[in-house]
Image (cartoon, rainbow, N blue to C red):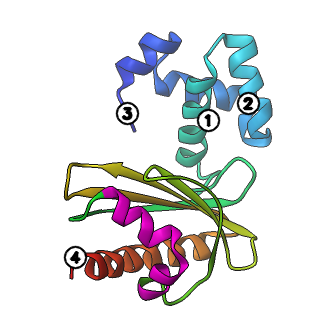
Amino acid sequence: MGNTSAVRRATGRDRGEWFGALDEWGAPECSYREIAEWLTGEHDVSRWWAQKLIVEYQQERGLRPPGVRPNGTFEVSASRTVAVPVERLFGAFVNSHQRRKWLMDGRMSLRTSEPARSARFDWEDGSTRVNVGFIDRGTSKSTVAVAHERLTDVEQAQTTKANWKDRLTELKSFLES
């Protein structure tokens, strides 16, 4: 969950008090946006804390499965540190010839990129998106973090997360061999 004293310092109440207030107000029947407006407008909670409280509240009450976004789609992520320079790791994603060597199942179309920092892709037919971030960890080490968004349900999210873990293991093997 998180540090209760941090919640109290930032919002004036602890998590349990907020959850009780949300229950009493009728939050289970309200949209994310309605709850956010109530927290920020009526209780002067910052947007960041409102978002955090809403997600934790909805997960605690079984109203939101982990990974679901406010629009009802799911997002999963995976990351891996690889013993290669960040430019090489970046190239393995944005160069379609290199990408085919480790990403055997699935097609990604590059939408935009910032060299050695980030890349955004459409996945397959474009109904889902893949956002990739790269972190330089020194001359021969870097980290990649993949976020696959707009997934339709929990099952697709779980399968996609497992697949990305496998793909990143394959990528690591490809680059470090």
Q: Relative to 129, is 81 on the left or the right? A: left
The residue labelled by disc 1 is 54
Q: How crowded is mark 1: few (under 14 residues within 10 Å), some or many (20 or more)?
A: many
Query: Gap between marks 4 and 1, in whole Å?
Result: 42 Å
In the image, 176 versus 127, the foreground residue is 176
Residue range in magenta is 86-101
Q: Which quadrant holds residue 140?
A: bottom left
Query: Gap between marks 1 and 2, in whole Å?
Result: 7 Å
Which dot marks residue 35? 2
Label 4: which secondary element: helix
Residue 154 appears in the figure:
yes
Q: Contact (CB < 8 A) between labels 3 and 2? A: no
Q: Position of residue 128 (x, y in %)?
A: 69, 68
Q: Contact (CB < 8 A) between labels 1 and 2? A: yes
Query: Gap between marks 3 and 1, in whole Å?
Result: 13 Å
Quick one: label 3 or label 2, which is nearer the N terminus?
A: 3
In the image, 6 versus 129, the foreground residue is 129
Q: Which of marks 4 and 2 is in front?
A: 4
Query: Gap between marks 3 and 2, in whole Å?
Result: 20 Å
> Is residue 37 depicted above or below 105 in this figure?
above
Q: Residue at x 21, y 82 (%)?
A: 177
Q: Which residue is drawn at 60% across and 69% down?
A: 154
The residue labelled by disc 4 is 176
